[in-house]
Amino acid sequence: MEKQKYVKGDLVKIAKNLGPCMKFFISDCEAIVIGSYADRVGGDHKKDHYTLHIKGHSQHSWYKEHQLTLIAHNQLELLKKWEEEEEKEER
């Protein structure tokens, strides 16, 4: 079984050009991995598609592994900070 490249809490940079099929997706910014398709839905397929928490934009799915670049591992505290800031803005 193939191992997925990113895990929950990884801080990543989303590529600027995601390709024509994803031209309306948020791009060229930082995000934190929430989980892979397999993590969130189950099974051992589609390990290369991820749900991300995009800074200032909450959670979005299904970004492809090759569209992401690792910045740092284990950034769950930063995720918590982003969520708190977004919650504060909503109020």
Image (cartoon, rainbow, N blue to C red):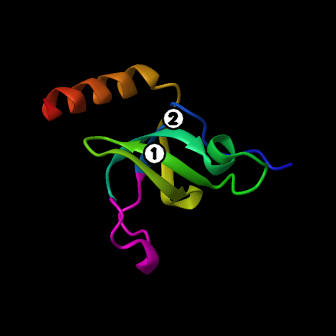
SS assignment for the magenta stretch, majority: loop
Q: Secondary structure at mark 2?
A: loop
At label 2, the amino acid type is: Asp
Is residue 39 part of the magenta span, yes or no? no
Residue interval drawn in magenta: 14-26
Which residue corresponds to the image point at 33% horizontal and 59% vertical from the top-left?
A: 26
Quadrant, the C terminus = top left
Q: Residues within 10 Å of mark 1 (few under 14, many from 20)?
A: many
Q: CA distance from mark 2 to mark 1?
A: 10 Å
Q: Nearer the viewer, residue 90 or 20?
A: 90
Quick check: 75 left or right of 88? right
Q: Is residue 91 above or below residue 5?
A: above
- Give the percent coordinates (x, y) of residue 49: 59, 56
Local secondary structure at mark 1: strand
Q: Residue at x 78, y 48 (%)?
A: 43
Image spot of residue 16 (x, y percent):
35, 63
| Label disc, if present, on residue 10 of the rendered structure | 2
- The answer to whether residue 80 is above or below residue 3 is above
Please give the residue where the numbered disc 1 appears in the rendered image. 52
